[in-house]
Image (spheres, rainbow, N blue to C red):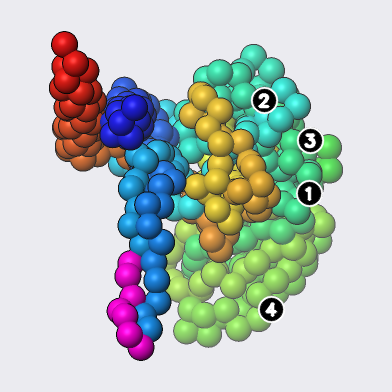
Amino acid sequence: MLRSLYSGISGLRSHQTMLDVTGNNIANVNTAGFKSSAVQFEDTLSQLLKGGNAGTDTAGGSNPAQVGLGVQVAGISTNFAQGASQATGRPGDMLISGEGFFAVKSGAETLYTRAGSFDFDDNGVLVTPTGGLVQGWPAANGVVNAGGALTNISLPRDAVSPAVATTTASIGGNLPDDAAAGTVLVRDIKVYDANGALTTVPLTFTKTATGWNAGDGTTVAGAMTFTDGKLTSATTLTVGGVTLDLSKVTGFAQLTTVAVGTQNGREAGTLKSYTIESDGTITGAFSNGATEALGRIALATFTNASGLEKTGGSTYRATTASGAATLGSPSDPGLGGLAVGYLEMSNVDLSQEFTNLIVAQRGFQANARIITTSDEVLQELTNLKR
């Protein structure tokens, strides 16, 4: 049989594969995190009709004469270029701006994905739409150990921010320099103990001939003196076990604005909401005003991302070609940051894919023409004997 028949068949098979890959790309044009693929062709083994010869003193050299036996698919590569960003506004949607993959536990296997559409399930575990468990590092007392083993990311709904005893407070405003001697101003300081119980400590300012005395109403903790309205005495005093920062208190005339500012104590609080930062840290906001890290989402990178194996569901499996995953936090060197409320869309270029459809179709038609032409030649041969 003619070699051209089999060359045409190989061309049909190869261009059918190109059509399959292109069709899959177009079908996933709106799949979040999808990466398009492209087919590379190569020629198959060539049959040697005449070998080449080196030139001699009496005759020139000759080149080898070979007939190709068709085409085959050399490989199907994945394009990991960044896809377009789509704003969703959902707190569970995350886009990796740069390199990296989310690590997802599926059964006993860890898979990797660029699709960042996540939600917390009924157990408070961060999961993919298909139930994969997003991996990262938990926090202990607000500190994330990013070098530890990966585990499921969970949101502890029953988390409690512990009470903090009050040890310092700031005082600001103005004490009137023109007040009469003996004038008393009282300001209350809210003080929490180690269990979060709230008490009130009175802070009493009493005008003297030289300035003001500060204390708790029964004991004078210290004297405050001013020059041209500026505090010239000690800037800290201790009243009721609380160290007061007085550096912002002034002593001008006719103004009585002295007030208690911030203090570092608080009661115990329950988790009210959470946010995800660009470095993957999940930060909880508590009812007592405290914020605390609850965990951090991990990212993985590979020496050869094109060596990853697609496993469906917009996930990939590490292979010997890709190398082992290198883990890190978002925004670490070599890894992208997270954008919350956004999704990475497919990087399929429709104009390129439709052009590839035309190229594949014409290539298929041309190879089909090889077969029909070869058939006509065989028909002529069989017609030699009637």
Helix, strand or loop at mark 2: strand
Q: Which residue is mark 1?
A: 148
Q: Are marks 2 and 1 in contact (CB under 8 Å)?
A: no
* Disc nearer the start of the sequence (3/2): 2
Question: Which residue appears at 41% of the width and 47% of the height?
Answer: 47
In three-dimensional space, the C-alpha distance between marks 2 and 1, rounded to whole angstroms, equals: 20 Å
Q: Which residue is mark 4?
A: 234
Q: Nearer the viewer, mark 1 or mark 3?
A: 1
- Which contiguous range is marked in magenta? 57-63
Q: Is residue 345 visible?
A: no
Q: Please state which amino acid type lies under the numbered disc 2.
A: Ser
Residue 266: x %, y % from top left: 70, 42
Q: Quadrant of the C terminus?
A: top left
Residue 110: x %, y % from top left: 68, 34
* Disc nearer the start of the sequence (3/4): 3
In three-dimensional space, the C-alpha distance between marks 1 and 4, rounded to whole angstroms, equals: 47 Å
